[in-house]
Image (cartoon, rainbow, N blue to C red):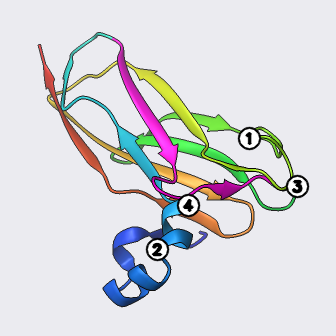
């Protein structure tokens, strides 16, 4: 199993020193805090919050996956050049439409960088109402 880098696994000192490196690889989830059971619910995942990521042939964000706990809900794949091509920088972003079930969602996202591997963002909990 490949190593999954996580923002919380990096010490405070290293986090500050490497803030741009960590930020540009971490997936950030954006959604409402409550959802209606059985109705489409938009969840946006953006790779990088303050910093952009390269979009070179050998170094780009290849995929973004959205999970509820250990269950894969959705995945988006990108090709080199999707954000403008070599020498360009940008943020891979995708909005998934999921249909919630159960009482709550524990959403987490993983981004895959072709040069620096897998990166997991901070999980987000969503209450599911009837």
Q: Find the distance from the CA under tag 1 to the CA under tag 3.
A: 11 Å
Q: Which residue is mark 2?
A: 19
Q: Find the distance from the CA under tag 1 to the CA under tag 4.
A: 14 Å
Between marks 2 and 3 in the image, the one whose residue lies nearer the viewer = 2
Q: Which residue is mark 1?
A: 83
Q: Sequence order check: which comes first, mark 1 or mark 3?
A: 3
Label 2 packing within 10 angstroms: few (<14), some (14-19), many (20+)? some
Quadrant showing the C terminus: top left
Q: Residue at x 78, y 61 (%)?
A: 59
At which x and y percent is residue 56? 83, 56
Q: Find the distance from the CA under tag 2 to the CA under tag 3.
A: 24 Å
Label 1 packing within 10 angstroms: few (<14), some (14-19), many (20+)? many
Q: Is residue 4 visible?
A: no
Q: Find the distance from the CA under tag 1 to the CA under tag 2.
A: 22 Å
Q: Circle 3 sits in a helix, a strand or a loop, which is it?
A: loop
Q: Circle 2 sits in a helix, a strand or a loop, which is it?
A: helix
Using the image, tell me which numbered label, if any, was put on residue 24.
4
Quadrant showing the N terminus: bottom right
Q: Which contiguous range is marked in magenta? A: 40-55
Tell me if residue 50 is in the magenta stretch: yes
Q: Circle 1 sits in a helix, a strand or a loop, which is it?
A: loop
């Amino acid at each position: 199993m490949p190593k999954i880098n996580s923002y919380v696994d990096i010490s405070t000192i290293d986090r500050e020193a490497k803030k741009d490196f960590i930020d540009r690889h971490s997936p950030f989830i954006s959604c409402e805090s409550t959802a209606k059971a059985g109705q489409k619910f938009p969840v946006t995942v953006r790779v990088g919050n303050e910093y952009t990521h390269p979009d070179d042939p050998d170094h780009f964000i290849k995929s973004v996956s959205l999970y509820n706990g250990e269950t894969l809900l959705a995945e988006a794949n990108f090709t080199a050049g999707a954000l403008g091509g070599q020498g360009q920088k940008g943020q891979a972003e995708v909005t998934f439409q999921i249909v919630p079930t159960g009482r709550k969602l524990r959403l987490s996202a993983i981004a895959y960088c072709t040069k620096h591997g897998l990166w997991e963002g901070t999980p987000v909990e969503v209450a599911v109402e009837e």
